[in-house]
Image (cartoon, rainbow, N blue to C red):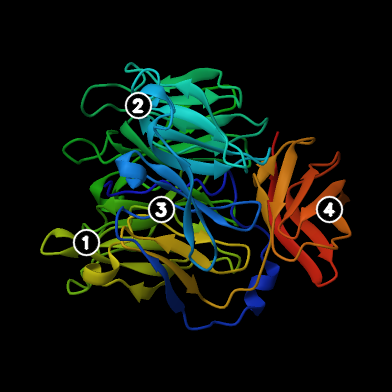
Amino acid sequence: MKKFCIIPLAGALAALLLSAATAIASTPPTFTTLTTFSDYDGVGSVVQGADGNLYGPACQANNFDGAIDKVTLEGAVAPFYNFCSEPDCSDGICPEGLLLASDGNFYGVTTYAGTYHYGTFFKLTPEGALTTLYGFTGAQGQPTGGLVQVSGGDFVGTTGATVFRITSAGVLTTLHSFCSQPNCADGEDPSGALLQAQNGNVYGETWQGGQGDCVFGCGTIYQITPAGAFTVFHSFAITDGASPRGGLTHGSDGNLYGTTEGGGAYSSGTVFKITTEGALTTLYSFGADINSHVGGPTCRLVEASNGKFYGTTHGVDDGEFGGGTIFEITSNGALTNLYSFDEGTQGTPFWGLLQDTNGTFYGATPAILYSLSVGLPPFIKPVPDSGHVGSPVTILGTNLTGAYSVSFNGTPAPFTVVSATEITTRVPFGATTGAIEIATPGGTLSRGFFVTP
């Protein structure tokens, strides 16, 4: 079982123009255990489907070959696709990095097996039909799970040795090959989900390497332009954090937010923000209370519909993994612990959170599937949350039946109401970065969207 997470929730921005957030009153968190796992390590990082259900990659399900599970919001779990269902496991083993793409299909990777035994890139339809699109080779290394759909519809991801771009038809281009020696300046061990920012650049992290003062380097943040130019954006030092792992989140203020597993003021990890010019600020250092048994965060932050960020930590008990927490943090670094896990009965939240369009957070440990409500109302979620003019966009939500207008920052867009949980549209000519607004009989719903070059 892996002790880290990949959360492919969004390609560019999780929330923008949250003017209504200040009107949302603070509500005490309500934690609910939805189901208990007994025979495998949970459903991993869940993603919301267009049908309103959740879907999660379970690496150790189906006799340890892995599965994609379908999960209702009430916690009923059922296998959606079992891997190693094809001869010689050509469809792969151990899925990760599942995301819902703008064409309505799921895409992801497996980390083992496949044609060349180093994992696969696959497409999974809403009906559960899987197509293996690419098999990774030993020269590339195994995919690490962090896919993002970028402008134009292609996907960018990482293996243990490369950053790659791949089409929905499975045509792969290597964008960067990392150095294979210790303490490489460009970083080692790429990890976490990637994101595409408003400027069109893709940003990612490496767990080690760089020019920091850790034994094997403290890790890096890197940038890749639409033309494919690779640049080390930031090299971590112990004082500002070490070993970033979960991936970056694009905040509604235009900054990038992330976490490190170690380093910081107390050597227990940090939460940081970094501008798109490369100026990094440490917002919070974990470990000030030595009795809290809180270890560093290893998962991507989620910017919720109230403009605050939410994440998880693993716990530390006598130097081992244990317990863990769910926390809330503002863009100014004010952190609140919302929930502490009991390792013995609930397990440790190695995976991060998803905010469903009903406003509630969902997550999993190896032992349980859970929800956390902080009183946030329903909202809409564009998939992807950035794109150029003409790009297809799927909008997820609740109670969308009867919607009578869709606009991108005031520019009307053609749309189709597919169901109560799904609307399809395209970025209209003349659209600019701002809020997507959907007018429904129950009121107007909005969510930020970046119009990219």
Q: Report the Cα–Cα distance between label 3 and label 4.
A: 35 Å
Q: Amino acid at mark 3?
A: Val
Residue assigned mark 3: 43
**Crowdedness of circle 2 by 10 Å Cα count: few (<14), some, many (20+)?**
many
Camera-side residue of 55 and 352: 55
* Image location of residue 77, percent across then percent down: 46, 58
* Image location of residue 39, percent across then percent down: 29, 55
Q: Report the Cα–Cα distance between label 1 and label 2.
A: 40 Å
Reading the chain from its start, which is encountered first: label 1 or label 2? Answer: 2
Camera-side residue of 291 and 172: 172
Reading the chain from its start, which is encountered first: label 4 or label 2? Answer: 2
The label nearer to you, 3 versus 4, is 3
Reading the chain from its start, which is encountered first: label 3 or label 4? Answer: 3
Question: Dots 3 and 4: beta carbons under 8 Å?
Answer: no
Q: Report the Cα–Cα distance between label 4 and label 2.
A: 44 Å
Residue assigned mark 1: 266
Res. 407 mark: 4
Q: Report the Cα–Cα distance between label 3 and label 2.
A: 20 Å
